Image (cartoon, helix red, strand yellow):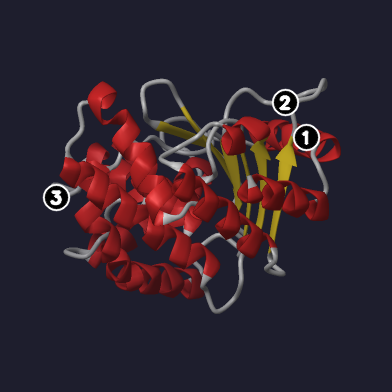
Amino acid sequence: MGIQLRQLRENCPGVERVGAKGMTRREAVRGLPDLSEATLARIEKGELNFRRNVGNLRTLLKRYGVTDEGLVDELVELNRETPNEDWLTGYRSFMPPGMPHFVGLEAEAVAITAYHPTVVYSVLQTPAYAKALYETGRPVEDTTAEFVRRNVELRMERKRRVLEREEPIRLRVILGEAALRVPVGDDEVMREQYEEIVQLAGLDQVSVQVLPFRRGYRSHHDFAILRLGGGLPTRVQTDNAWGAMSSSDKPREIERFTRRFDTMVGLALGVEDTITFVKELARR
C-alpha cells in the first residue's frame, strides 16, 4: 500500500504549477490536522497505516486524482489487512533504519536475488550461525544479550516467511568464498551451516552459487534485489557502513545491480559444483 501511495503522489497532477507532475508530502497533507509529513513518510515506507482514520486515505486518493473505485477499494482493503503484519512490531526497536521496510517487502516478494561476499546470506543461516555472528559483534557494537536473542528470532522468522510460503519464492543467492571460509562460531556451528546450505540448495525454488577466489569481477558490497510482482516496482537493498539499509526502486539502480549479479553468475561455480564444494567443507 505504501509503495502504491508514493507512486500515486509522485505521478499525480501537480498543484503548484500548471502541467507539473506530482506533489510533495507537505502539499499532500495540507489541511489534514491529524496527518503530518513525517507520518505520511512512514506510511509510504510501510511502517504505519491509516488504522485510526481511513478517511485520510480516501482524501489523499482524491487529491491524487484517483477516480477508479476499484483501486480505492483495493487500497482500503490493503490498509485493513496491514495489522496482519504486526509480527514486526516487537522487533522494530532492535532493527537498524530502513530494515522494517525491507523485511516487510521481503515477505511479499515473488523472487529474491542476493549476494554477500563475506557472510552467509541471512535467510540461509542456521540459528546457531546467526547467534554466533551477533555474539562476535557484541563487544564492538555494544549490544546486549537481548539484542542478540531478538535478532536471531527475527532472522529465523524471516527465513520461515521466505522459504515456507504456500507459493514458493524464487531465491537465487551468490556467496563469496570468504562467506564459507571465514569461521563463525566453532566447528560444529560451521558444519551445521554447511549442511543447511546443501539442504536448501536442493529445493526446487532455491539456487546457491559460490563465487571462488579467482580473478574476475566481484561486487565488494552485499545487496538483494526484490521482485514484488503485482505491478509493483522491483527494489534493490544494500547495507551501508553506518548499519542502516539503503534501498531504491529507480530502474537505473535496478539495472546496475542486476548487471552485477548476472556478471558474477558467469564466474561462480554452478549449482551442482557449489553443493559438492560445500559438502567437502562440511567433511573437513
What residue is shown with label 3?
Answer: 34
Q: Nearer the viewer, residue 64 or 251?
A: 251
- Is any atom of residue 114 visible in this view? yes
Gap between marks 2 and 3 measured at Cα: 48 Å
Dot 2 crowding, Cα within 10 Å, few <14, some 14–19, many 20+: some
Residue corresponding to mark 1: 264
127 or 37, nearer to the observer: 127
* Residue 64 visible somewhere in the drawing: no
The mark found on residue 88 in the picture is none
Q: Residues within 10 Å of mark 3 (few under 14, many from 20)?
A: few
**Location of residue 166 (image quadrant):** bottom right
Neighbour tally class for label 1: few under 14, some 14-19, many 20 plus, Cα within 10 Å: many
Amino acid identity at mark 3: Asp
As displayed, is residue 134 above or below residue 194?
A: above
Pointer 2 with pointer 1, Cβ within 8 A: yes
Which residue is disc 2 drawn over?
A: 218
Q: In the structure shown, which secondary structural element does the residue marked by tag 2 occupy?
A: loop
Kindly report which numbered mark, 1 or 3, lies closer to the viewer in this rendering.
1
Identity, as a three-letter code, of the amino acid under mark 2: Arg
Which residue is at 32% across, 65% downward?
85
Q: Nearer the viewer, mark 2 or mark 3?
A: 2
